[in-house]
Amino acid sequence: MSAYGNKLNPYRKIREPRGVKGIRQSVSITNNPSTIDQNQQLLVRFPNLSNNDVIVPGTTRLAFEIELTSTDDNATIYQNIGRAIVKKTTIRISGNEIMSIDDSDIYHCYVDLWKSTSERLNMAYQGIGETNMLKHRVGADDKASDTGDEAIATAYGARFCIPLDFELLETHMPFYQAGLGDRLEYELTFNNYSNVIKSTDTSASYTIKNICLEFDMVTDTELARQIRQQVNGKMVILYDRILRHRKITKNKSDTLWNINLNVPARSMKGILMLFEDPERTSTETYYNPNITKVEMTIEGVPNQLYSQGMKAYQQWDEINKFFALNSKRNKTTEEVLKDLNLSYTTLEKYLTTNYALWLDLRSTDDNSLHGSGRRIENASEGITIQITKTAGANKLINVYLFVIQDAQINFEDGRFKEVNY
């Protein structure tokens, strides 16, 4: 900033002249097929569009309508159906796998709990909101009268959307499918009825119809030309590779858990553990196993990350390093919101209903840095995690281990070349 400050800066201006005069259009393309059932895989291929059309970052989603069939008149859907309805997400570029996430519903429903409270209030299209609002939208008989919920139901009805928020569509230049010789593809595996529908009827089912790919498109010759120049050379797309390494079953009554991971990585950002009580009644509730100490051995070297082990009071600070408002769209906004602690997940919620264990292996908690994670080469020794906890009831829980790595896609001469991670 100049010596004159912000308002007295002689070169101050809040606008840029000669703005682009592209033609903007909100596009909705019916997918083929346009219906899907539980445990089926849906292929979504991005259209070529014209040579001057680009997709605006952060606008891509898959919309659908849901209809419930049940003998329970009060049947409804779980919260955040846009995430909960997909149990596996695979992203490919002309058959080349970029990322495949098993139990993606478990992972993404948790990540969305770290968005700001205000953002979540406005995410009704994705299915985030109060349960009464969802009851209005699917026609449950026990819905309560509420002006706001009724207004949302009138506007959206039983139409929801699945975010297609891979970094190629979110964090980089506008997506230019016409400039690539390879087609971007999503393969989504739809979840079991029981993981989507909340009902006393064990035979309740859903019907998904009118599936459409939605995005905002801008048509502009010069913009397309500038993007084409980059695509025709050597282009790199940086992204987080999410791997559900394992799903294991543990007993709440245990006081010691030993967990091993053998995942080689050039840059491992960290390890996320999510704990699911099989008896939970919400897709946005995660179990806290009351962990008192976490000790790590990496490639045979003990006392890693925390020299005396990570204690219970350190877990909140640790998870905030990566998940607190980890926006893919605006790093400046993310930094401000993170500094002001404006996440929907507060300390109290974290320790009760929104718990997860995060082990951050980066050099620093700067989410704008790529490649600052831990290099893991000795896969035979890998990582050993020893967890000390308070004994709970003699009941089983599911433990999901997710590994997050720095990765990149290399393009050359407009074609996919390779993926590195």
Image (cartoon, grey):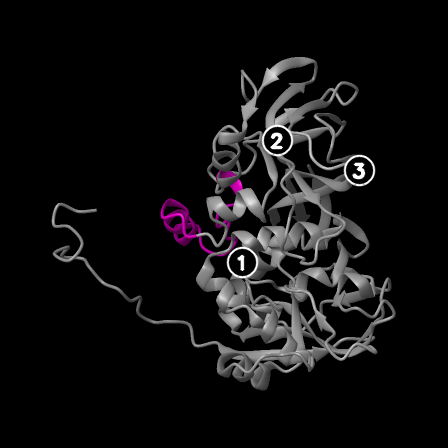
Q: Is residue 167 above or below residue 42?
A: above
Q: Nearer the viewer, residue 346 or 418?
A: 346
Residue 123: tell me if it is visible: yes
Q: In the figure, residue 249 lies in which quadrant?
A: top right
- The image shows residue 113, relative to residue 363, as above or below, that is below
Residue furthest top as drawn: 301
Could you tell whether 97 is left or right of 23 in the image? right
Q: What is the quadrant of residue 333 in the picture?
A: bottom left
Q: Which mark is residue 220?
A: none
Distance, label 1 to label 2, CA atoms, is 42 Å
Disc with the residue nearer the chain's start (1 vs 2): 1
Give the vertical position of 181 relative to 323 (above or below).
below
Image location (x, y in percent) of residue 389: 65, 28
Q: Amino acid at mark 1?
A: Met
The answer to whether 36 is drawn above or below residue 394 in the figure is below
Q: Which residues are magenta?
A: 321-342
Secondary-structure class at tag 1: loop
Front position in the image: 111 or 175: 111
The image shows residue 285 at horizontal and vertical percentages of 63, 52
| Residue carrying label 2 | 291
Q: Position of residue 190 (x, y in %)?
A: 80, 63
**Residue type (three-letter) at the residue carrying disc 3:** Ile
Classify residue 357 as left or right of residue 43: left
The residue lying at 21 percent from left, 46 percent from top is 1
Residue 57 rendering spot, x and y as whole percentages: 54, 63
| Residue 183 seen in the current view | no
Q: Residues within 10 Å of mark 2 (few under 14, many from 20)?
A: some
Question: Mark 1, mark 2: which one is toward the viewer?
Answer: 2
Query: What is the residue that sits farthest to the bottom in this orientation?
Result: 154
Residue displayed at 64% across by 82% down:
157
> 365 or 112: which is nearer to us?
112
Q: Which residue is mark 1?
A: 173
